[in-house]
Amino acid sequence: MLEKAIRFFRSLDFLKGAVMAIAMLIPIFYSVYVLNNIHIGFSIALGVLFCSPTDVPGSTRHVFFGILVAIFLSFGLTLLIGSIATYFWLLMPVLGISVFLVSYVSVFGFRASQITFVGLLAIVLSFTRDYTEESLLEHALLIALGGFWYLLLTYLKILIFPKFQMDQLFVKTIEKTSDFLKIRSELLITTENRGDLYKKIFDLQFEINELHETIREIILTERSKSGFSNKTRRQQLIFSELVDILELAIANTVDYEKFDVVFEKHKEIVEEFQKLILEMSNQLHHIARAIRKEEKLQANTKIPEILKNISRSIDLYRILVGMPKARVGTLMLLNFKNYQEKQAQNIVSIERVLNNYKQSDKILSHRDASRFITPQDYDFKKLTENFSFNSPIFKHSLRLTLVVIIGYVIGEQLSMQNPYWILITIAVIMRPSFGLTKSRTIHRVLGTLIGAFIATIVILVTQNTVVYATIAVISLPMAFSLIQLNYRNAAVFITLNIVFLYAIFEPNILSVIQFRIIDTLIGATLSFLAMYFLFPSWQVEQIHEYFSKAIKSNEDFLKEISLFYHKKGSISTKYKLMRKEAFLNIAELNAVFQRLNQDPKSKQVELSTIYEITVFNNTFLSSLTSLGTFIRNNNTSAVPAEFDVFVNNICLNLQQAINLLENTKIETVDLNLDIDKAENSYQKAFMKLSDKRDEEIASGLEHSVETGAQLKETLLVSEQLKWLNNLSGKIITAVKKYKSRVEELEN
C-alpha cells in the first residue's frame, strides 16, 4: 500500500495534476490578495482547466498544438455562448450546433477527443458567469491568458523533467509486458480457464500496442528534431527490445491442446517452462523498479539455471520415451526452449542498454523509422465519410447534443442552484460506447456520494474556513491526478474541491451538497438512458469491420513471411510494417470485443461465435508470428512447393472469410486435394529425414547438424502450416455462422 502511494506521488499523472493545480491556484491567490478581485483569478484558472485535457503523452510538438487549439477553442466558444446566454430562442439552436460540431471533431482520434472535451467544458462553463456584471470579452481574454500560462508551465515541466515522460511510459510498458508473460505462463499449465486468460490477454495486448504507438511517436519525432543523441539512441534501443519481447510473447509456438496430450505424463517439463517464463516476468518488473530508482539494476541468475534444468529435462524425456517415439515431442520442446532463450536475451539487452550500450547496435534510419509512425488522419474527407448514421461518432455527437439541450432545459425549469452541474456531468460521462458510459456513470455517482458524505461530516465537525480552504487546495491536484487512473476516486476529490470552495463563500453549504448530488444524479440518469434509447450504437453493428481488417492484415503478414522464406536475406521494412499492422488490427479487434462484452446482454448477438472469431484471429497471428520468427532466426533450406500450396489455400480461405463479411461474391477454388497431397509430401519428407537421422545415430553420428536442422524445419514449418490452414477453415465456419445469425435477425 505504501509503495503504491509513493509510486503515485512520483508518477507522471501526479506531476501533471500538481502542475495544473499550481497553474490554477497561483492566479486565484494573486487576484484575491493583490488585485482584490477573485473573478480575474477564476477566469485564468478556467483557462488552465480548459487546456489541461489536451496535455496527454505524446511528442512535444503535438502537445504544443493540442494546447494551442484548446486555447483558441475555449476563447471562441466562451465568447459565442456568453454573448447569447440570455436569449433563449437563439441559445438553443446555437448550443445544439456548437455541441454537435465540437463532439464531431473526435472522429480524428484520441487527442482530438480531448479537444472535444475542452470545447464541451467551455460551452458548459460559459453559463457560470453573469455577464451583466462583468465584461464577457475580458473574461474570454483571461481564459486565453490562463491557457498560455498553462502552456508555459507545461514547457517548463518538460525542460525540468526531460526524461520523466519517457521513463514513465517505459515503466508502464515493461510492467504490462511482464503481466502478458505471466498470463502466458498460466496458459501453459491450466486446462480449465483458458478462456478467461485469453480475455485478459486481449486487454493487455491492446494497452501495450497503444503504449508502443505513443513511445514510437515521441522517439521518432524527437529524432527528426535533434538527431541521434545519446538519450534518443538508448530510448530507441530499449523500445526495439520491448517490441521484440512482445512479438516473441505473441509468437507462441505452443498448441496448448497438443501440448496437454503429448506431455500429459511429463508435466514436470511444462512446469519448468512455466518457472522460466515467470522468472522473466519477474525480471521485467525488476527492470521497471530500477528505472523508477526503487532498486539497483541487477542481472538475473535464476534464468540461466532454469534453462539448464530445461535442457536436462529434455534429455531425460528423450531417454525415457526413446527414439523415434520421442522425436516430435523433443523437437517441440527444443523449439520452445529456443524461443524462451531469445526472450531472455532480449531482457538482458534491455539491462545492457540501461547500463551501457554498443555503438554497433542496429538502429533504423529515420526514413524507415518514420514509416512506423501511425499518421494522424486530419483529412476533411473523414468528416464527410462519417456524416451518417453508420458512424458511431456521428450518432454520439447527435445524442450528446440532444441530451445537453434537455439537461439545460431541465436545470432552468427546475430552478436548480447550479444547473450547469447537470451539463458537466453529461459532458464527462457520455462516451461513444455504452460500456464506458455505464462504468463512468457508476463511478461518477459513487464518487459524488462518497465525496458528499465526507464533506458533510467535515462541515458538521467544523465551520473553520481555513480547514475548508486547505481541503479544497489539497483535493485539487489529487482530483486531476486520478482522472485517468481511477475515475471514481477522482470524482470524490472533485466533489470535495467544489463543495469546500463554495463553503468558503456560501453560508448554507449543506444545500450546495444537496444540489450537487441531485444535479449529478439527473445528469447521470439522462446520459445512461440516452445511451440505451437515443440512437444507440452497439458494438455488434461494427465488429464485422474489425473482423475484416484483422483477417486482411493477417493475410498480408502471411504473404510477407512467404516472400521472406523464398528470398532469405535481411528482413525488409515492408515485413515489419505488415507485422505492425497485424498487431495493431488484432489489438483493435480485441478492444472492440471487450466493449461488446460490456453492452447489454440483449445486444450481444452471437457472442460465443464472435468470441470464437476473435480467438481464432489472435491464435492465427500467434502462429504466424511463430512461423516468421522461426524462419528469420534459422538458416532455412530451399522452399518446397508444398509450402506455397498451403499458403495459397490459407490466403484463399482468409479472402473467402473477408468476402462473406463484406457480402462480396467470389469464385471459390477447392484446393483441398492439393492440400492433402502437400500434407502427405511434408509427412513423407519428415519420415525420410527421421529414418536418415536414425541411421546416423546408429552409425555414431550423434551430432549431425544438417539433418537435425532439416528435421526441425520440416516438422515445425509443416505443423504451423497445418495449424494455420485449420484455423483459416475455422474462421470461415465461424464467419458463416455469425453472418447467418445476423441476417436472420435483420429479416
Image: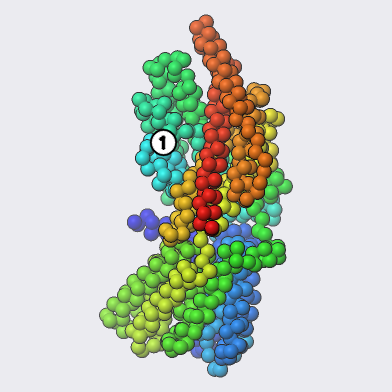
Q: Is residue 86 above or below residue 318?
A: below
Q: Is residue 521 above or below residue 724?
A: below
Decide which of 16, 697 is in the foreground and name it. 697
User: Which residue is denoted by mark 1 in the rendering?
Assistant: 188
Q: What amino acid is found at the position of numbered circle 1 in the picture?
A: Leu
Q: Residue at x 64, y 75 (%)?
A: 72
Which quadrant holds the N terminus?
bottom left
Q: Residue at x 42, y 78 (%)?
A: 522
Decide which of 292, 49 is in the foreground and name it. 49
Residue 675 horizontal/vertical position (percent): 60, 28
Asked whether residue 604 is in view, the answer is yes
Residue 477 horizontal/vertical position (percent): 45, 69
* Crowd band around label 1 with a 10 angstrom C-alpha radius: few (<14), some (14–19), many (20+): many
Q: Quadrant of residue 112?
A: bottom right
Residue 596 horizontal/vertical position (percent): 48, 56
Residue 348 horizontal/vertical position (percent): 51, 37
